[in-house]
């Protein structure tokens, strides 16, 4: 039998036979010499290992069975692959042979088996614990030794931010370099020191400068992937102010902790307080208590009252939300009203805490709390005048929204910002507003001409670049709200194109979701009930019927949607919006770039005619989607930001995306071309090139809009009156010496004046021809068309028919459609000419603009009427 197949030998001195009570050595032939059977010296599992592997004179194995061998191996004396180290004369049992060599770390543990092998000994546990603690101590010591105490003088160094026009030339350099001055602690009022202690760190004079629980919360938050929390002690906040890196990393947090510990031991509490108040950011570009005192109260810090100190201390919670002047350009929730309420609430609480902490006597507290010390308004800083201030505001807002840079960090300066603004176009837009203002408004002598404001923006279609804007009269004139980038002014009938686009895309409940044609007819008469899809009617709160109004009571009868858009008649679009579904109208507007936050929340019938309040920038960008055949690009004002010579990420130009079928966008454009040629926007015909646009006027004549575009440029112009005290909109009835201001009047004149200059020397590419879209689905209840004998068209119409319901109800014949591109002006007729359109020409005469303000016959624009009743509908114009 082969050495590999023979029965395993028994261990020396026993084995199975011994356990059975047998005596004597085990039988068997002697082991063959090493290598006698041809096996390798290192053959794993070979049993022919020579005498060294067995007891003397026998061939029994070291262990009695494989199971015992495994158990023995677990105990540390397992089967050996070679026998060179076996003791002569016999095998090594569990207690025989030399002991295993000691290990530095006995893990898994020798001499243990089962789960006990994996339980560390107390020696190992103690040693590791001591080593870990020792390592932390060493690391902390090294970290403590290496960090330096920050200097408030170093932190006070700030630079200008430099803004550039789109061509790379410098627009303005502005910053906080001259708005910072350190004070010694004796120049800082005790009331200011006590205000921040009572509000932020009551244990300031007793603590070591570090809040362990605050750091633990920050680290735990970071481990969960959230934002780290700021230092809760004044010492930590001072360190954070002066330790310029704001990276939310573990390294920065530990470094801040070491610096805080060193600051707490090396600096006195007065030095820490001095540094904190000199390096804190108070908003409006003011760093340090002296700059804050000058900015908010026009006095030195040493002259601040306790009540004023409490207001400034409230700003440290976040100037964006606690500056009573408001900061709505950065955050829509930071309005003047909301901020004032927040500031007053925290001011009152801080004074109460100071009184509770015995840092204000009863008499001083009563004096301080008696009247809220309202800070003075914003002031223009060096270089921030004219439209520069609003362009800087828009660009800064864009940078903060597209990066992790904080406002405080940004205002420290050192950034170079390249914008999209083109100087020649900005100048042209400003000149257009000023020219029309001067010629039409006399605020010095006419009460109704006071407080009139304009907002405008110009965007490149299929790109999104904002090339020009008009934000107001300028910071130097006390106007700090950017009218171009602020919502709050209802857009009126400039909303109607979204209703039409949604109808062409999604259809109505009557068309079973099939897109409808702009030649579909709806009732355009005044004072109509609005029907729900289930056949019921909308009611007012008193359960009376809600009636939608037009501006005039002209009996339009059933007119096409194209005609209703041309003359800006309200009733067809209100009913169409209900038939399509207001949620789909909202979705259409949102797809073109309108922010949902600026849309009216109540999707009632008046939603269809402009109760929403997008900014001028968003309206220009949204209409640019129609100009670009359905491609939407988000508006942007910054193309590059650099800091210390390095370009920052996050400012790549937004990519256009197709948000609607090109045929829908092109058909909307075709309808809006007709608004300028034959409708309420006829004043824009003076541009002398292919253009499309829509007028808009709102309820009680509180605002008027014109939004229009060519393929190269989309521009919106808003006009409104605003009470300077509470910023509520005022009626423009009587403004500019007219009964009312409409979108087709002054706003269209501003638009035309600007576009003439902005497009001077440019070609006129026109618009793509629209493809016939949808089917005619008339309003439920519309008269059924009666077949009429075929009439041969004459080259020149002799007289336009009057727009009576009976004559306007039949659909146009094919010959009519073919003679005017695709859609026709279906109602020629005599009718009240609109104040926006002036004296009109017939459909075949499209070369002469009408004269504004004259009520004539024909196709002059009848203004859409004020919405009324429960819904407070905006007037469509």
Image: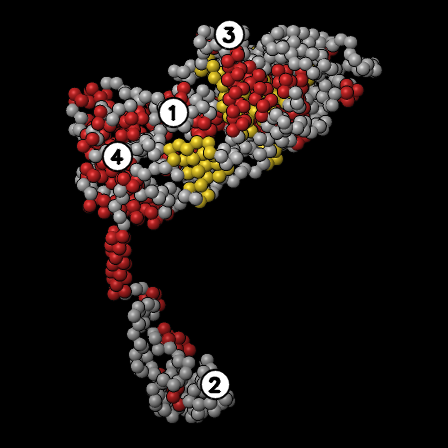
Q: Report if the CB atoms under discs 4 and 1 are less than 8 Å apart.
A: no
Please report the residue visible at 31 percent of the width from the left and 22 percent of the height from the top: 375
State the image coordinates of residue 136 (x, y, percent, origin top left).
Answer: 27, 56
Helix, strand or loop status at disc 1: loop
First of labels 2, 3 by sequence position: 2
Which residue has dot 2 on it?
40
- For mark 2, does the 10 Å Cα neighbourhood hold few (<14), some (14 to 19), or many (20 or more) residues? few
Helix, strand or loop status at disc 2: loop
Closest to the observer, 803 or 506: 803
Does residue 432 appear left or right of residue 628 in this picture?
left
First of labels 3, 4 by sequence position: 4
Please report the residue visible at 59 percent of the width from the left and 15 percent of the height from the top: 744
Whether residue 506 appears in this view of the structure is no
Query: Image height check: is 319 above or below 242?
Result: above
Which residue has dot 1 on it?
380
Closest to the observer, 765 or 400: 765
Please report the residue visible at 47 percent of the width from the left and 91 percent of the height from the top: 36
Question: Disc 2 versus disc 4: distance between alpha carbons?
Answer: 87 Å
Closest to the observer, 614 or 872: 614
Does residue 685 appear left or right of residue 475 in this picture?
right
Q: Nearer the viewer, mark 3 or mark 4?
A: 4
- What mark, if any, has residue 734 been given in the picture? 3
First of labels 1, 3 by sequence position: 1
First of labels 4, 1 by sequence position: 4
Question: Disc 3 versus disc 4: distance between alpha carbons?
Answer: 54 Å
Q: Nearer the viewer, mark 2 or mark 4?
A: 4
Which residue has dot 4 on it?
182
Question: Disc 2 versus disc 3: distance between alpha carbons?
Answer: 114 Å
Q: Nearer the viewer, mark 2 or mark 1?
A: 1
């Amino acid at each position: 039998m082969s050495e590999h197949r023979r029965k395993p030998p028994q261990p020396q001195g026993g084995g199975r036979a011994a356990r059975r009570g047998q005596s004597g050595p085990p039988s068997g032939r002697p082991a063959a010499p090493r290598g006698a059977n041809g096996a390798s010296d290192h053959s794993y599992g070979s049993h022919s290992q020579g005498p060294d592997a067995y007891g003397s004179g026998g061939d029994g194995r070291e262990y009695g069975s494989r199971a015992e061998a495994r158990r023995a191996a677990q105990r540390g004396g397992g089967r050996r692959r070679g026998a060179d180290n076996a003791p002569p004369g016999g095998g090594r049992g569990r207690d025989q042979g030399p002991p295993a060599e000691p290990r530095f770390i006995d893990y898994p543990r020798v001499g243990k088996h089962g789960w006990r092998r994996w339980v560390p000994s107390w020696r190992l546990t103690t040693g590791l614990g001591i080593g870990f603690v020792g390592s932390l101590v060493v690391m902390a010591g090294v970290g403590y030794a290496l960090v330096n105490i920050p200097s408030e003088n170093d932190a006070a160094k700030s630079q200008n931010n430099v803004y550039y026009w789109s061509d790379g030339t410098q627009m303005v350099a502005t910053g906080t370099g001259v708005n910072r001055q350190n004070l010694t602690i004796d120049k800082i009022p005790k009331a200011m020191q006590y205000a921040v202690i009572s509000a932020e760190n009551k244990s300031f004079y007793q603590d070591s400068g570090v809040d362990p629980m605050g750091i633990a919360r920050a680290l735990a938050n970071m481990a969960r992937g959230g934002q780290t929390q700021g230092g809760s002690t004044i010492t930590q906040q001072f360190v954070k102010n002066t330790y310029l890196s704001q990276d939310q990393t573990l390294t920065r947090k530990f470094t801040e902790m070491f610096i805080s510990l060193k600051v707490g031991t090396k600096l006195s509490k007065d030095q820490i307080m001095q540094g904190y108040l000199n390096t804190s950011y108070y908003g409006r570009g003011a760093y340090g208590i002296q700059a804050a005192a000058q900015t908010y109260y026009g006095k030195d810090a040493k002259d601040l009252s306790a009540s004023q100190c409490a207001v400034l201390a409230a700003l440290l919670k976040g100037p964006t939300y606690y500056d009573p002047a408001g900061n709505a350009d950065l955050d829509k929730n930071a309005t003047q009203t909301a901020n004032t309420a927040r500031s007053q609430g925290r001011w009152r609480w801080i004074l109460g805490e100071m009184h509770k902490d015995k840092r204000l006597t009863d008499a001083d507290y009563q004096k301080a709390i008696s009247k809220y010390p309202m800070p003075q308004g914003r002031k223009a800083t060096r270089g921030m005048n004219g439209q520069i201030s609003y362009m800087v505001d828009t660009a800064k807002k864009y940078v903060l929204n597209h990066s992790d840079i904080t406002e405080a960090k940004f205002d420290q300066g050192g950034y170079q910002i390249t914008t999209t603004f083109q100087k020649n176009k900005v100048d042209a837009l400003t000149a257009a507003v000023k020219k029309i203002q001067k010629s039409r408004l006399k605020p010095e002598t006419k009460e109704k001409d006071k407080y009139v404001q304009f907002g405008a923006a110009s965007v490149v279609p299929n790109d999104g670049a904002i090339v020009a804007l008009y934000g107001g009269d300028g910071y130097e004139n006390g106007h700090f709200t950017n009218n171009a980038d602020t919502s709050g002014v209802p857009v009126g009938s400039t909303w109607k194109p979204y209703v039409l686009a949604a109808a062409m895309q999604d259809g109505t409940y009557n068309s079973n979701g099939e897109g409808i044609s702009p030649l579909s007819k709806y009732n355009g008469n005044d004072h109509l009930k609005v029907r729900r899809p289930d056949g019921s009617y909308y009611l007012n709160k008193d359960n009376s019927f809600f009636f939608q109004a037009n501006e005039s009571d002209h009996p339009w009868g059933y007119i096409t949607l194209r005609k209703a858009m041309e003359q800006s008649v309200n009733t067809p679009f209100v009913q169409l919006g209900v038939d399509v579904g207001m949620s789909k109208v909202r979705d259409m507007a949102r797809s073109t770039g309108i922010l949902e936050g600026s849309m009216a929340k109540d999707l009632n019938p008046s939603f269809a005619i402009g109760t929403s309040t997008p900014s001028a920038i968003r309206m220009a960008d949204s209409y640019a989607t129609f100009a670009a055949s359905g491609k939407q690009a988000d508006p942007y004002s910054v193309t590059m930001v650099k800091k210390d010579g390095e370009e920052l990420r996050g400012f790549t130009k937004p990519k256009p995306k197709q948000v609607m079928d090109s045929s829908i966008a092109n058909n909307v454009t075709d309808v809006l071309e007709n608004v300028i040629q034959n409708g309420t926007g006829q004043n824009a015909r003076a541009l002398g090139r292919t253009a499309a646009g829509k007028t808009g006027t709102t309820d009680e004549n509180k605002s008027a809009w014109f939004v229009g575009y060519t393929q190269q440029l989309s521009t919106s112009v808003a006009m409104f009156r605003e009470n300077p005290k509470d910023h509520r909109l005022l009626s423009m009835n009587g403004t500019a010496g007219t009964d009312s201001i409409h979108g087709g009047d002054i706003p269209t004149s501003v638009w035309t004046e600007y576009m003439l200059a902005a497009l001077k020397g440019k070609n006129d590419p026109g618009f793509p021809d629209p493809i016939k879209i949808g089917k005619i689905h008339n309003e439920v209840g519309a008269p059924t068309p009666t077949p009429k004998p075929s009439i041969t068209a004459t080259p020149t119409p002799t007289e336009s028919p009057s727009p009576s319901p009976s004559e306007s109800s039949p659909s146009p014949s094919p010959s009519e459609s073919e003679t005017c591109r695709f859609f026709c002006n279906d109602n020629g007729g005599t009718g009240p000419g609109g104040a926006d359109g002036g004296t009109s020409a017939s459909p075949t005469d499209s070369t002469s603009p009408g004269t504004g303000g004259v009520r004539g016959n024909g196709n002059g624009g009848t203004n859409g009427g004020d919405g009324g009743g429960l819904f407070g509908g905006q007037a469509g114009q």
